Image: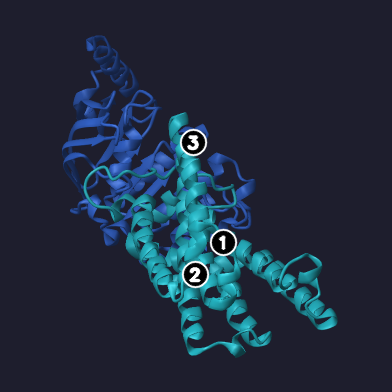
Amino acid sequence: MVSAGGLGYRLGSGRDILAEIDFTLSPGSFLAVVGENGAGKTTLLDLLMGFRRRARGSLSVLGQDPDTDPWQARSRIAYLSEKIDMPGDWVVADFLGFHRRFYRSYDRDEERTLMGRLGLRSDTRLGTMSAGENRRVQIVAGLAARPELLIADEITAVLDILGRRLFLALLKERQQTMGLTTVLATNVPEGLDPYADHVLVISRGRQVAFSRIASYVPDGGSLADAIADTLTTHARALP
Amino acid sequence: MLGHFLKRDFRDFLLWWIVIGIVTITFALLHLVSGDSLGPALLLPSGYFLLFLAYLMFANLPMNYVLGSLWRTQHGWSRHYLLALPLSHWRLFGILHARIAVFWLPLIVAASAGGVLFGWTLRFSARQWTLSCLGLFTSVVLWMEMNIWCALLMERIRGYISAGSRVRAWVSMIAVTYGVMGLVGAAWFNVLVPDRAASYLDLPRPLAVAYWPGASWALFPVGLLLAALWARWNARRWCVTLGSGPNVKRVDPA
């Protein structure tokens, strides 16, 4: 479904932002990508979406190389990001109406159900909504397209606690019923334990852990604590 | 899919279309009532120049919106959204040009109709007719690519680049803008002003090409070639998949 081997990204100035990223995700997995601020999480997701061109290594998303502009594959991907903005003059219905035209598998019944569950009204102007509400609209648009892969870049940070739990529960439901694969980059790993099954920890552009959560988290411990331990250990190891 | 975008653009810019419609009607009424007295009153050869200016500003209006620019207002959309859509990025780049071209229609129509309405083109020779058509096409595409380039350069300027790079970017933007205006202006001068009249004008040396007989036959094709190369450059800057090789220097969408 998604695999990276020796993946690296380098700025034009020659500075390495990401290096030696190796992981493979099978369909139906839920990967949490975590790391300190500036670790390279967003860069990794940009590479997965083809927004940046890798400097080295291999990368495959839904069997395609993102650098080759695999536009057909993008109809099977939902991309949710804080960087996605829609015109503030539009109402929610305008945006969903515009968006659904691009996705053959878009399900309007699903859209209505999700609107209800996420507490959204179709006549609300996007410009008057909070950042969290805007993300909820994105979630509706993304999930109603019935994607096989969901790539979410730090979208949970602006959701309130109930919104965050609901979002993760929606992903879990789709993972179980439709085999949805999720790659979620986040700075807030707390509470992810019941949902994610894999974790990728990045520190200063280097992969310091990729593992199944069941084997990564010690008995009785939490995912957040295990990640904090990994990052602390890695920080100490640096000169 | 182009229609889907155009329909949306029309709704989003409806107010501006109404404004430009009002400007056009006002100009037409003034022209009917007082002839072309507006231009001379403002020391312009014709009031038509004011209308052209309004149309030119209108054509520049949607640039950041269409590109999904980094320095867009909250009324725009982000490039990340556009690039994540299941559309080929080349196709999307083509759609982007078509969407921008729609905003040039008032100017294109005015330029085409103006000559007939005011009798400028009635005295045109076949050579001038041919060059005018070529010139109009060249001017629009060259200006369009320049606008896209400027918008992308502004993204770079507002990004995390050094003060020196910012200054260089500003200087290049100003230089290129004047360069394009000079090229297009010289070519049009060469088409519209008879050789004899031109020879009496004491133009600065770099602009003297404007009265070389037949210079526009070379200037317009050069402009077209520049526009084509510029489109290629802009594509790589707009989206990394439209470039070649690793780490194409570009502004990352945000």
- Residue shown at 60%/89% (left/top)? B123
**Which is nearer the eye, B162 or B118?**
B118
**Which is nearer the eye, A167 or B9?**
B9
Chain A in the picture: what colour? Answer: blue
- At label 3, the amino acid type is Val
Q: Name the residue under label 2.
A: B187
Measure the alpha-carbon separation of dots 2 and 3.
Answer: 30 Å
Chain of the residue displaying label 2: B
**Which is nearer the eye, B29 or A40?**
B29
Whichever of callouts 2 and 3 sits on the residue coming sooner in the sequence is 3
- At label 2, the amino acid type is Ala
**Which label belongs to residue B167?**
3
Q: Which of the 4 image quadrants contains residue A201?
A: top left
- Compared across the picture, whether A188 is left or right of B192 comes to left
Whichever of callouts 2 and 1 sits on the residue coming sooner in the sequence is 2
- At label 1, the amino acid type is Leu
Q: Is mark 1 on a helix, strand or loop?
A: loop
- Compared across the picture, whether A202 is left or right of A98 comes to left
Q: Nearer the viewer, mark 2 or mark 3?
A: 2
Q: What element carries label 3?
A: helix
> Where in the figure is residue A91, as x and y percent of width and height?
60, 57
Measure the alpha-carbon separation of dots 1 and 3.
Answer: 30 Å
Q: Are marks 2 and 1 in contact (CB under 8 Å)?
A: no
Q: Name the residue under label 1.
A: B203
